[in-house]
Amino acid sequence: MITSHAALLIGTFITSYLTAKLISKIKHPKLLVPDIHKPERPLIPKIGGVAVITSSIYALACSYILNIIDTKLMLLLFFSIFSGCLGLIDDLIEIEPLIRVSLTIMPGIVITCLGVVSQLTIPPIGILQNMLLINTITLLALPIYSNAVNMLEVVNGVIPASVCIIMLTMTLISTIVGKYVNIIPSLLVLSISFGVYLLNKYPARVFNGSSGTYALGALLGAYMILYDMCVPLLIASLPYIINGLLIITSSKGFKTRHKLRRPTVMNYSDGRVVVNPDPKAPLTLMRLIVLSGPKTEKEIVNSIIILFIMSSILSLLTYLLLLPFH
Amino acid sequence: MMKYTVIIVLTSWAILVLLLYLALIIRNFIAMYNPPQFIDVIVLVLLIALWSLITYSISRVIERRGLKKFLQYIYIDKHEKKK
């Protein structure tokens, strides 16, 4: 059993890393975008998310062959592949934001129709068994996560690094509270994102693109619902949720990046990012980070990662403190 | 440093925990009247709206204050260069 799980996790990591490495060698001009936060603006491949799709396919096939698959794991990986493909289409031919957001609801509808989730634990409230409430949370969680992760894709390495931090926290919480069935799925998501992280970290050699952000977002949202980790995952991913909330409310709805004013401006003379003084620019986490002074991209990456570490510690403390009360 | 974002994350976390307790109180209160299932959904939507409103308002206030300081800093910087 341990050998099967080790083969699954190590194989997934290697598939993710090798695919990302292969993508980093792409030279096709249509698949390259400039890294605007570097003074020399190097051209980087934008479809790094394909690594998430291929590693999810590997994990699905491997767990099936090794006979360690269950319905929840199958759905988790299937949603990652579906959302990744949706993001890939968006990377290649831009989809209208409203259509894109609507399509991210699909995995939630599948979970609701299959009735895989029969209860949710929300400390301190307790165990929820109201199916109407559970279905509402399920339908909200997946599109929220896919789009919130997509909105924080602003600097190198933040998305895979944050997913690694969140999943490490989920593994720790699952071990402490004795939810051992959650450990393998969380380590699986961790190995998928760690493979991408090695090539997306500062200075990036691949960008996640919508394919990567949607797939990783779907993995977070689906894990939260399928493995009953609503409160800890919600708190650990607070920076995502806050950033998404601020962008949608300050820009009054779903808009493409091209239609929004830039919240920050790159100062190419000293290679630092400064806040855009235009009060009509959307409010984002990155804008708030550079509000206290100009910062290099590396400093912004570190700030966002520190925020995720902080929210993960809060998640761990909150869950362990609230759990005895329900 | 990144004090603005740390304040926002900590505040929104504290509000979230308080709202979870508020949800517990509301749930226990309405349970006495044997309500229909959709009441839970309405409570959830209201709590999400309340959390979003508080978090957005705090962030907006912090952004405005920070932007004011930033613009003052640019103004002073330009003024000193002219001198």
Image: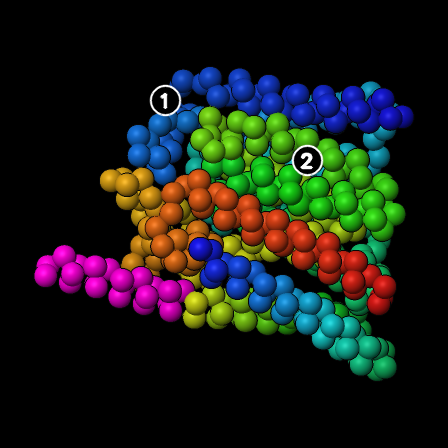
Structural distance between the alpha carbons of marks 1 and 2: 31 Å
Residue B29: quarter of image: bottom right
Give coordinates of residue B34: x percent, y percent.
85, 78
Element under label 2? helix
Q: Tell me if residue A86 can be seen.
A: no
Please identify the quadrant where the C terminus of chain A is shown: bottom right
Q: Nearer the viewer, residue A321 or A44?
A: A321
B34, above or below A199, in the image: below
**Which mark lies nearer to you, 1 or 2?**
2
Give coordinates of residue A144: x percent, y percent.
60, 52
Kindly identify which chain the residue marked by label 2 belongs to.
Answer: A
A28, above or below A297, in the image: above
Q: Is residue A37 magenta?
A: no
Residue A21: quarter of image: top right
Element under label 1? helix
Give coordinates of residue A161: x percent, y percent.
58, 39
User: Could you tell me if the residues under marks 1 and 2 are in contact, i.e. CB atoms within 8 Å?
Assistant: no
Give coordinates of residue B71: x percent, y percent.
27, 63
Mark 2 nearby-residue class (10 Å; few <14, some 14–19, many ≥20): many
A67, above or below B55, in the image: above
